[in-house]
Amino acid sequence: MQRPVDPNDEALRAVTPAFCDYTQQLLFEEIWERPGLSKRDRSLITIAALVAMYRPDELGAQLERGLDNGLRREEIAEAMTHLAFYAAWPSANSAVSKLMEVLDARDRASREGWPA
């Protein structure tokens, strides 16, 4: 399974410094900060795009970001149900599995007193 891109990951930076810089500066500091959409809405759009393109390796990190940005579990689940009919059932099915993994991990962290 592919790791989510963390532009602060020194091992990744050693191999692809420009990629890390673009991710941090262009994507996170510019695109995600534009005033036209809330971070919550950007998260929903990003999750939908990743489900539609069948990108499960990237989806986990974006599900976490979406929850942190105010999306409710039920909203993400409903989006995935809706996408099953527009993006393909297998894509949505895989996305639901990834959502369950993320939610289980967050629930465990919460029970153990760690920030979710």
Image (spheres, helix red, strand yellow):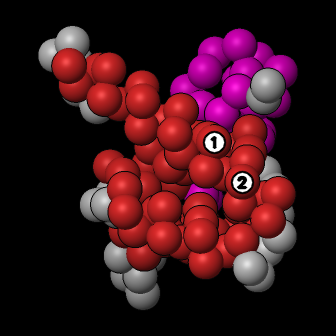
- Return the x and y of residue 90 as percentages of the image width and height: 82, 57
Tag 2 residue: 93
Q: Residue furthest left?
A: 113
- Return the x and y of residue 16 as percentages of the image width and height: 81, 30
Numbered label attached to residue 40: none
Residue 7 located within the stretch drawn in magenta: yes
> Which span is picked out in magenta?
3-27
> In the figure, is residue 85 to the left or right of 45?
right
* Helix, strand or loop for disc 1: helix
Quadrant including the N terminus? top right
Q: Residue at x 42, y 56 (%)?
A: 66
Mark 2 crowdedness (10 Å alpha carbons): few <14, some 14-19, many ≥20: some
* Helix, strand or loop for disc 2: helix
Q: Tell whether label 2 touches label 1 (CB within 8 Å).
A: yes
- Vertical relation: 108 (above or below) 98: above
Quadrant including the C terminus? top left
Numbered label attached to residue 97: 1
Residue 33 in sight from this viewpoint: no
